[in-house]
Amino acid sequence: QNSSSLSFLPPGEGFWTFDPTHFPRPLSPWMQKYSFEGITNNSRRLGCLIQTINMRCINGFAFTQPGFFPPTEIEKLERAASAYWEKKLYEDDYREFTDFFRPDVERLQNELRLVDPSALSHNSLVEFVGKCYDYALEFWKLHHIYSMPCMVVVGDYMNRMSDLTGKPATETLALLEAASPESRGILNKQDITLSKMYNLLKRNAKAVELLKCDEHMAPWALDCLLHMPGELGEVFRQVCIEYGWTLAGGYDLTVPALIETPHFYLKTILQGVEQEDDAVEESEERVEKLAAEWREALPKDKREAFDEILDMGRRFFRMRDERGLATDLTGVGLCRRGIMEAGRRLKDSGIINEAEHLTVATKDEALSLLTGNLGSLSNKKLGPIDVPTSKVLQNRFLHIKNANPNSVPRALGVPPPPPPDTPLPPGIGRTMRNIDVALMKGIWDETSGSTEDVKDNADRVTGVAASAGVVTAPVALVLQDSDLQTVKKGDIIVTYSSSASFNIVLGLAAGIVTNYGGMLSHAGIVAREYGIPAIVGTQNATEKFKSGDVVTIDTSTYSVTRVKE
C-alpha cells in the first residue's frame, strides 16, 4: 500500500513525533518489539529531565514521545547532575565502554561468526535462527546503553569549546574530523587487518582485475578471491566475515549486508585499493593544523583547558560512532546471515517467495515456518495465531521497501505548551543544554542557514550545510537500500537520510544531500570524515532531483541547484 494512502492517527494521548532521520522506513515486526529503555537507563544519573522515550508504530513507522521526571524529582536529579560533572563520572562510562562493552560485543559477534549457517543441519539451523533473533534484539539494547552519555558529553564538548573559543557550537565539530576512523567501515586503513588486505591486493594484479569485474561477473570474481591461496586469500576471507556482513543502508534485519551484493562489495574494496594511502594522514594533518590555530589564538592560561576539552570530545565522539557500528550494523548484519540461510531453504521448499521475506517475520513465525509447529504461535489471550502465508510476508516486505517517508506526518496529537520560563539548577541546566546542542539542534534541527524561498523552485533546494564545499556532479538517487549499489565514483548521493552504514559508499561520492537530519546526523558526520560537501535537512530533495541530473552543492549558500544544459 502506498504510504500516501495510509491513515495516521495519534497512538495515544499527548504529542508524538516521527523521526525520519533515523527510521525513514517502516520497522520490521522484530524491530517494532524494541523499547528505548536502554536510552533512558542513564537519565537519572546524568540529571536529565527525560525519564523515558515511548515508541509506537503506526503502519510500521516509528513515532516517539518523551516522558519527563515529575517536578518532585528535581532536587535528586540536581544532586546526580552535579556529581556527574564535578566528579567527571563520564570517565567511568568511558572506561566501562572500553573495558566491558567492546569485549562483550566482540564475544557476541564471534559466536555468530564461528557458525556457518549453510553447513548446519535443519534442526541446528532452527536453533541458530532463534539465537539470531534474540541476539539482534540484544545488539540493539547494547547500542543504546551508552547513547545518553555519548550525546551529553559530545554536547558538553561543543558548548565548552564554543564558550572557550568564541566559535559557534556547530563549528567546533571541525576539530572532531578524523577522530572516528571506524566510521569509514571497510575503508578504515588504520585497522591492521584491512590495511594488510589492501597492501596485499595492490601487489596482486590478478586480484585487482577481479575487483574490476562487472555486475554479471562479480559473484564469480568474489568466489575466486575467497578461494585465493596463500596469505591474500586468508586475509580476504577474514575481512569478509568481519566486515562483509555489515548492513548497507539502515539498521533493520530487512537491510541487505554489503557482501550480499558482490559487485557493490568488490567496487567498495577497489575504492580502498585505489585510494591514496596518505589521504587519511592529510585529513588528520588538516584537522591538527586547525586545532593548533584555535589553541594558539587563546591566552596561555586557557590552553590547558582547550587540550582537556578536545581530548574529551574526540574520545566520546569516537565512542558515539563505535557503539552503533559494532552493534546494530555489524551485529544485526551477522544475525541476518543466519536468517537469510533459513529463508533460502524455505524458498527452495516453496514455502516463501524470496529468502529475504523471512526478515519481516517475527521469531515465532520464522520458527513455525521452519518446523511446521503452529504451537509456537499460540497466545494465552488470543489463542492460536495464523502462520503468515508467503503472500503476507511478501506484502510486509514490499510495504517496508517501497515506503515514502515524505508522505508521513512529522507529528501527531496536540503540541505541549512551552516549558516554564524558569532557570534550571546548574547541574541539570548543563546536562539539558548539552542535550539541546547535540540532539535537538545537532540531529533534528533542520533550519537552513538560507532565508531563500525555494518551495516553488523545481531546480533548487536549501538546507543545513553539514560539511563545507562546492561540487558539481551527477545525482545518484537512493530511495531503497538496493539503490546504494548503483552509486558510481564521483556521484552526488540524494537520499531521505543516512545511517552510519552509508560510510561504505560515501567514499565513492562527491557529495551527499538528504531530506532529513542536522549537523550531527550520520550524513554530516561521515561527509566531514571524507571531506565532501553535504547539505542535509532539505525536506524534499528526493522529489526534486532524479538520478542522472547534474547538480551543484554550494554550502556557502546552503543550496543544491540543478545545472541546466
Image (cartoon, rainbow, N blue to C red):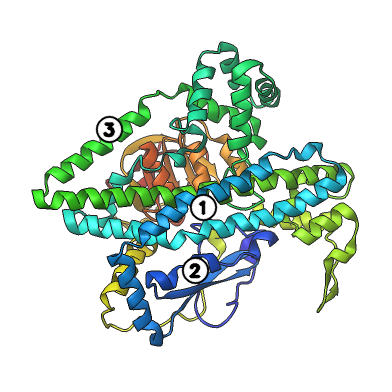
Pointer 3 local density, CA inside 10 Å: few below 14, some 14–19, many at least 20: few
CB under 8 Å between callouts 3 and 1?
no
Choose the circle earlier in sequence order: 2 or 1.
2
**Left or right relative to 226: residue 375:** right
In depth, the one of 493 and 57 nearer the eye is: 57
Q: Label for residue 101?
A: 1
301 relative to 276, above or below: below
Give the residue type that dot 2 points to: Asn
Under mark 1, the amino acid is Phe
Q: Is residue 443 among what the camera can see?
A: no
- The percent coordinates of residue 555 (x first, y second) are 31, 45
Q: Position of residue 37 (x, y in %)?
A: 55, 69
Labels 2, 1: front one: 1
Classify mark 3: helix, strand or loop: helix
Q: Secondary structure at mark 2?
A: loop
Q: Is residue 377 left or right of residue 419?
A: right
Residue highlighted by disc 3: 285
- Does residue 248 appear anywhere in the picture? yes
Mark found first going from the N terminus, 3 or 2: 2
Give coordinates of residue 150: x percent, y percent: 41, 57
Q: CA distance from mark 2 to mark 1?
A: 15 Å
Residue 41 - label: 2
Secondary element at tag 1:
helix
